[in-house]
Image: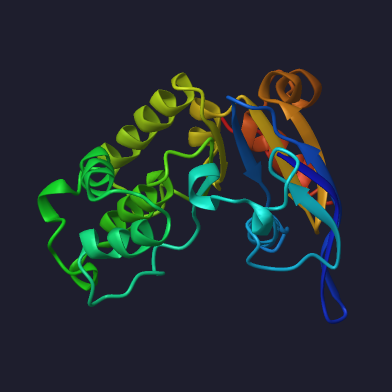
């Protein structure tokens, strides 16, 4: 995936200001940045949910809205509240599957993968936040895509769910998938990501491997969180985590 000088304006407010970076295949990349830094806006532009004011995001050379089979190429889960509360979990996925040539067997398979096979006939309105997160992950996996994009995927998951998510990501990367996720959890970033893209005020402040970031920015008494805060909030002082 390549972002090429992406600019997004909302009236007089510039939410993205010349964002450019490349994500290597078969890796896990974490998008970091404070609230309002542009992470979610960038993901929405990348997935064709917002139109860039300038620039573009390409998935293997093609913008998302021009992909022939988008669900089979890029799977995404951005919002755990984006489900019809009156539909069952199975029917929610089946409605998308029908329009993309995906079988009922695949719907059942991904529900099992995310631990919702036993509640597939329950209405989504009865689900907890963690269960809705799992349903969103199932939707992203539906087309067995090369790219998977998640916005705060562990929000609402309990400890067992977080460990399960880590194992899921590791198994997907082992199968050759490319994972892109945003997070505010330094623990999850350290455990899952090989690459970082740090946003600040609509710009990319750092892009590279986690190892490169640690080498360039971590002091002897600093944590990843300390170094991240120093970059994303350069005019504030931060005490090293003990």
Query: Is residue 132 among the parts visible in the rendering?
Result: yes
* Location of residue 142 with respect to 242 vertically, above or below: below
* Location of residue 183 with respect to 215 vertically, above or below: below
Q: Position of residue 141 (x, y in %)?
A: 40, 44
Q: At x 79% / y 41%, what residue is drawn? A: 231
Q: Position of residue 140 (x, y in %)?
A: 43, 49
Query: Is residue 238 among the parts visible in the rendering?
Result: no
Q: Is residue 108 left or right of residue 99?
A: left
Q: Is residue 201 left or right of residue 44?
A: right
Of residues 118 and 215, the one drawn nearer to the viewer in this rendering = 118
Q: Position of residue 79 (x, y in %)?
A: 46, 63
Q: Is residue 187 left or right of residue 4?
A: left
Of residues 53 and 208, the one drawn nearer to the viewer in this rendering = 53
Q: At x 72% / y 59%, what residue is drawn? A: 38
Quarter occupied by residue 93: bottom left
Find the residue positioned furthest to the bottom. 11
Q: Is residue 58 left or right of residue 4?
A: left
Q: Position of residue 226 (x, y in %)?
A: 67, 36
* Location of residue 81 with respect to 153 vertically, above or below: below
Q: At x 73% / y 58%, what residue is drawn? A: 37
> Tag count in the figure?
0
Of residues 169 and 203, the one drawn nearer to the viewer in this rendering = 169
């Amino acid at each position: 995936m390549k972002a090429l000088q992406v600019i997004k304006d909302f009236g007089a407010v510039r939410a993205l200001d010349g964002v450019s970076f490349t994500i290597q295949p078969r890796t896990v990349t974490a998008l970091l940045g404070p609230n309002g830094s542009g992470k979610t806006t960038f993901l929405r532009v990348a997935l064709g949910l917002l139109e860039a004011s300038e620039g573009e995001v390409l998935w293997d050379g093609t913008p998302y809205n021009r992909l022939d089979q988008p669900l089979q190429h890029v799977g995404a889960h951005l919002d755990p509240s984006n489900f019809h509360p009156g539909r069952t979990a199975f029917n929610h996925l089946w409605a998308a599957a029908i329009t993309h040539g995906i079988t009922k067997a695949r719907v059942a398979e991904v529900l099992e993968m995310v631990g919702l096979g036993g509640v597939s006939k329950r209405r989504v309105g009865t689900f907890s936040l963690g269960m809705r997160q799992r349903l969103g992950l199932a939707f992203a996996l539906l087309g067995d895509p090369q790219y998977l994009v998640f916005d705060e995927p562990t929000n609402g998951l309990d400890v067992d769910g977080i460990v399960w998510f880590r194992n899921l990501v590791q198994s997907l990367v082992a199968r050759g998938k490319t994972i892109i996720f945003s997070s505010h959890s330094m623990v999850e970033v350290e455990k899952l990501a090989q690459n970082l893209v740090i946003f600040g005020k609509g710009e990319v402040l750092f892009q590279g491997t986690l190892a490169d970031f640690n080498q360039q920015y971590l002091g002897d008494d600093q944590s990843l969180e300390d170094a991240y805060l120093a970059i994303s909030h350069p005019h504030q002082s931060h005490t090293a985590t003990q």
